Image (tube, rainbow, N blue to C red):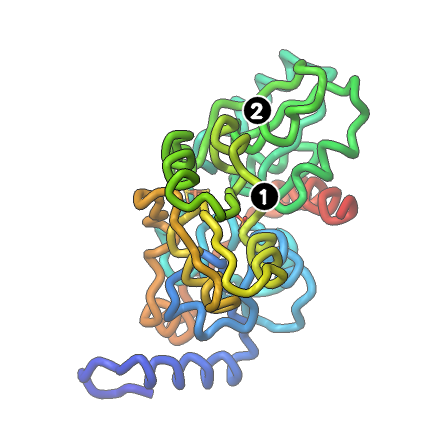
Amino acid sequence: MNTSNIPLSRKQLTTEIRSMAEEKNAVILVHNYQLDEVQSIADFLGDSLELSRKAAETDAEIIVFCGVHFMAETASILSPEKTVLLPVADAGCPMADMITPEQLIEARIKHPDAVVVTYINSSAATKAFSDYCCTSANAQKITDSLPEGQKIIFTPDMNLGAWVTRKRSGHDILWPGYCPVHHRLEPWEILEKKKQFPNAQVMIHPEAPLDVLKLADVVESTGGMVKYVRNLPEGSQIIVGTESGMINRLRKERPDIIYISASPDTVCSNMKKTRLSHVHDALKFNQHVITVDEKTAVKAKKAILKMLEVV
Ligand code: 13P
Ligand code: SF4
């Protein structure tokens, strides 16, 4: 342990993180958009769905969640007996704040016949008033599992909602929230890249607007993107429309593929807040503990478990 004031090197931070994790029986869950240095100390690296499953299954006493606040909250809902730590207290997701539980209750009163499907990028309190949760990896399966005539209120991501309900009757209600990072993607950027790289496939995250998604060959969650590139022929070219750090993650999987960023302006500053030093301090000082009050957690858990049952 560092008792002097000399800053620790990356190697020392890594060694101390691993030894504290072992000593304290902690598991380190890391989202695919995290910085490379943080990905390098992960026990599990994945998308929101894969990490929720790990949080539900783990035997560890402590879960260190390297991601954003709603992910740590979800882990705490699924494993309330465990200590869940978020290394940077203010790493949040702006989309999660685009709906409040009060607004959702109002929408439910207005549309009593609707089923509420809420994206996991939401607060625990919003999940508590939802029928189903979903992630970008299973949103399509969840909405497809509902009968055609069933009205859906999809919250809070209108883009993901538009994508997964595009073949339904058109009576569904899309809450006007969005991811500020993916919402910036524009069709012309994709068209220009396609012209520049005519042999490249286009792979886009479903948080992008519908007119952008319609130009894609592949629409996938971050975990789906990792699986997709694993099976590409050697030397393939692929235009990637998502948070810009994802290309580093994909390059680690398949370094021989040529990745072309769809847009230079897609950085999630919240996902990039966490550094190795924060993970180190999280374990050393048991910070920042994320909890959800029991009443909210019990209700939110029902919606999350319904999602985990469908897929
Ligand atoms: P997935 O990793 O589940 O695709 O989600 C992306 C995201 O924006 C997480 O905040
Ligand atoms: Fe939220 Fe978008 Fe960042 Fe994901 S990429 S955490 S949805 S702001």
Q: Nearer the viewer, residue 93 or 126?
A: 93
Kind of residue indicated by mark 1: Val
Dot 1: element: strand
Q: Which mark is residue 27?
A: none
Q: Residue at x 63, y 11 (%)?
A: 110
Q: Nearer the viewer, residue 32 or 288?
A: 32
Q: Residue furthest top?
A: 110
Q: Nearer the viewer, residue 46 or 253?
A: 253
Q: Residue at x 59, y 72 (%)?
A: 61
Q: Are marks 1 and 2 in contact (CB under 8 Å)?
A: no
Dot 2: element: helix
Kind of residue indicated by mark 2: Leu
Instruction: Give the vertical position of 269 relative to 276 (above or below).
Output: above
- The Cα–Cα distance between marks 1 and 2, rounded to whole angstroms, is 32 Å
Q: Residue furthest right?
A: 147
Q: Which residue is mark 1?
A: 218
Q: Residue at x 54, y 38 (%)?
A: 216
Image quarter for residue 155? top right
How crowded pointer 2 is (Cα within 10 Å; few <14, some 14-19, many 20+) is rated as many
Instruction: Give the vertical position of 288 relative to 15 (above or below).
Output: above
Dot 1 or dot 2: first in sequence order is: 2
Q: Is residue 108 toward the left or the right of residue 310 in the image?
A: left
Instruction: Indicate the quadrant containing the N terminus: top left, top right, bottom left or bottom right.
Output: bottom left
Residue 39 at x, y = what percent?
44, 68
Q: Which mark is residue 104?
A: 2
Ligand 2 is within 8 Å of the C-beta of the residue at disc 2 = no
How crowded pointer 1 is (Cα within 10 Å; few <14, some 14-19, many 20+) is rated as some
Residue 83 at x, y = what percent?
54, 65
Residue 105 at x, y = what percent?
59, 22
Q: Nearer the viewer, mark 1 or mark 2?
A: 1
Q: Residue at x 48, y 51 (%)?
A: 238
